[in-house]
Amino acid sequence: MGPLVWVAAVAVGVFAVSANAVSMVLVMQRAAPGRAGQDSALVAAGFFAGFALGPPLFGLLAAAGRYGWGWILVATECAAACGVALAWAIRERRRAGADGGERDG
């Protein structure tokens, strides 16, 4: 393996940690009073479950010669995340409109 593989591995690790930190900041800002712990625990469970289960699942598919299905799984997860983000943005926009444009945070 060439040195670029190690650079890529470090970059993936750095970006994964950064995404987790940025997501937690957003969760803490948007959590309802008294729910920050529960909300952040749910997000952390999702992140770490993905880190724990994603590579072995992809590896099983790759070992079976099913790379296409592995990438379909990754694309489906990304599409689901985009759907959740879109629904959240729509809900926030409607809530801001109902409150006369005022918003916390």
Image: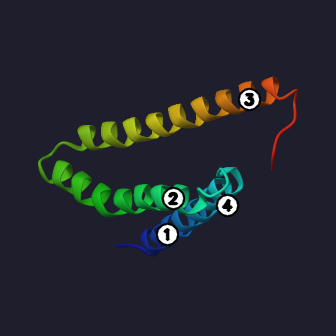
Gap in Å between the C-alphas at discs 4 and 1?
19 Å
Question: Which quadrant would the N terminus be assigned to in this image?
Answer: bottom left
Asked which secondary structure carries label 2, the reply is: helix
Q: 95 or 2, which is in the foreground?
A: 95
Above or below for 87 versus 81: above
Q: Which mark is residue 94?
A: none
Q: Which residue is mark 1?
A: 13
- Say whether disc 3 or disc 1 marks the residue closer to the N-terminus: 1
Above or below for 27 versus 17: above
State the image coordinates of residue 20 (x, y, percent, origin top left): 55, 62
What amino acid type is highlighted by mark number 2? Gln
Gap in Å between the C-alphas at discs 3 and 1?
36 Å
- Judge from the rendering whether residue 2 lies leftward or rightward of residue 61; answer left or right: right
- Say whether disc 4 or disc 1 marks the residue closer to the N-terminus: 1
Q: Which residue is mark 3?
A: 95
Q: Which residue is mark 2?
A: 38
Q: Residue at x 60, y 56 (%)?
A: 23
Gap in Å between the C-alphas at discs 1 and 2?
26 Å
